[in-house]
């Protein structure tokens, strides 16, 4: 695997070469493979179905468009399907349809760790390879999980940023996505452990949920500030939530008084960094995540990864290794006023 700093340095080029767009992709948007496939096995004729938590989410638009570019590069056929709203069982009918239509692989960001398991295992019984990315299911419901970064690393970077921004003391709150989101809850538990062990003067006073809905996240931010007049900072480990919270803070009396950090994309957060609402936030590259997920699915279809283990090439990202059913992308990257202009996704 290439080192993280090499991926960061090449990020702008990767995004441009993938031809990414932040517009939503409809369920009918598929692409047929080219004749100069670099893959072996059945990957050149296979169909790869990407199933995000919900359509119209800029984060998944970016990851799925990169996945599309990767699938087309190795000669497969790409499809994106998904619900309009993220809910625990909303992905089930799309999984069933993909299996019935003979998809080679499903690439899924799970809204719930268990609600889609039966459908995924039925798909696997029909010889559909299942890759989860961003948000995992239970391990026995998929073949590989593409982990954007270790949960510990994601939690730590967010706690470190808020601690620095509020002088390592004061009340903070967390604005999360759905209450049952696997990745969000894992990060929050680890953030609580880090705060308790290393930041005794910071108090987590509340955790609220915006369900990855812009308006609800905006309203939850307003409610947090009203209920906690001494609030010093907010962590939002979700791209929808942090952008909505920044939008609220940018025109409120709390701008410059309440720090906001978490996980966001540069294009969403640029104006809020430039106007001083947000000092620093973090994320991995969702384009890299989508690319890696596509190549991991290809490796499963080709038989290069079996029983959760094996090595494979992921295009320009280089070589990766699957161990115990997990492939690790890398470490989170911090965006701030000094570097945000270098990125476009």
Image (cartoon, grey):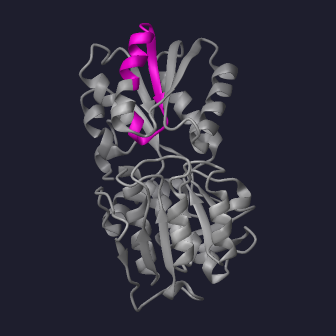
Q: Position of residue 72 (x, y in %)?
A: 41, 79
Q: Position of residue 86 (x, y in %)?
A: 46, 47
Residue 158 falls inside the magenta stretch? no
Q: Residue at x 74, y 59 (%)?
A: 140
Give residue 119's quadrant in the image: bottom right
Relative side of 263 to 219, left or right: right
| Count of picture labels | 0
Q: Is residue 143 at least partly visible in the picture? A: no
Image quarter hosting the N terminus = bottom right
Observer-nearest residue: 99 or 325? 99
- Look at the image and give the residue range highlighted in magenta: 220-241
Q: Is residue 174 above or below residue 105?
A: above
Q: Position of residue 211 (x, y in %)?
A: 46, 37
Give residue 242's quadrant in the image: top left
Q: Is residue 132 above or below residue 234?
A: below
Q: Is residue 59 at least partly visible in the picture? A: yes
Relative side of 44 to 277, left or right: right
Residue 240 falls inside the magenta stretch? yes
Relative side of 269 to 181, left or right: left
Q: Residue at x 35, y 14 (%)?
A: 257
Given the current orientation, which residue lies at the most extreme top position? 230
Q: Position of residue 171 (x, y in %)?
A: 51, 13
Observer-nearest residue: 275 or 31? 31
């Amino acid at each position: 695997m290439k080192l993280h700093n090499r991926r960061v340095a090449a990020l702008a080029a990767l995004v441009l070469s993938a031809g990414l767009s932040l517009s939503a992709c409809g369920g009918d948007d598929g692409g047929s493979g080219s004749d100069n496939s670099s893959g072996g096995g059945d990957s050149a004729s296979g169909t790869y179905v990407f199933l995000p938590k919900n359509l119209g989410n800029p984060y998944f638009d970016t990851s799925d468009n990169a996945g599309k570019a990767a699938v087309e590069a190795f000669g497969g056929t790409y499809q994106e399907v998904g619900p309009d709203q993220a809910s625990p069982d909303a992905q089930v009918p799309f999984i069933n349809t993909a299996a019935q239509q003979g998809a080679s692989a499903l690439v899924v960001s799970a809204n719930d760790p268990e609600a889609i398991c039966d459908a995924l295992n039925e798909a696997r019984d029909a010889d559909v390879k299942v890759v989860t990315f961003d948000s995992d299911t239970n391990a026995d419901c998929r073949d590989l999980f593409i982990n954007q970064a270790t949960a510990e690393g994601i939690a730590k970077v967010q706690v470190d940023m808020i601690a620095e921004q509020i002088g390592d003391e004061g009340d903070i709150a967390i604005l999360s996505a759905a209450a049952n989101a696997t990745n969000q809850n894992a990060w929050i538990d680890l953030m609580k452990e880090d705060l308790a062990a290393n930041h005794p003067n910071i108090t987590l006073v509340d955790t609220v949920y915006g369900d990855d809905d812009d308006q609800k996240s905006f309203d939850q931010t307003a409610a947090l500030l009203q209920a906690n007049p001494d609030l010093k900072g907010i962590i939002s480990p979700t791209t929808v939530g942090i952008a909505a919270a920044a939008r609220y803070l940018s025109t409120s009396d709390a701008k410059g008084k309440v720090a906001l950090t978490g996980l966001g994309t540069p294009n969403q957060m640029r104006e809020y960094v430039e106007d001083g609402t947000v000092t620093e936030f973090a994320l991995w590259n969702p384009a890299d995540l989508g690319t890696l997920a596509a190549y991991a699915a290809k490796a499963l279809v080709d038989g290069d990864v079996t029983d959760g283990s094996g090595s494979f090439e992921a295009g320009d990202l280089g070589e990766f290794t699957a161990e115990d059913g997990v492939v690790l992308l890398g470490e989170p990257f911090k965006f701030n006023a000094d570097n945000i202009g270098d990125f476009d996704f």
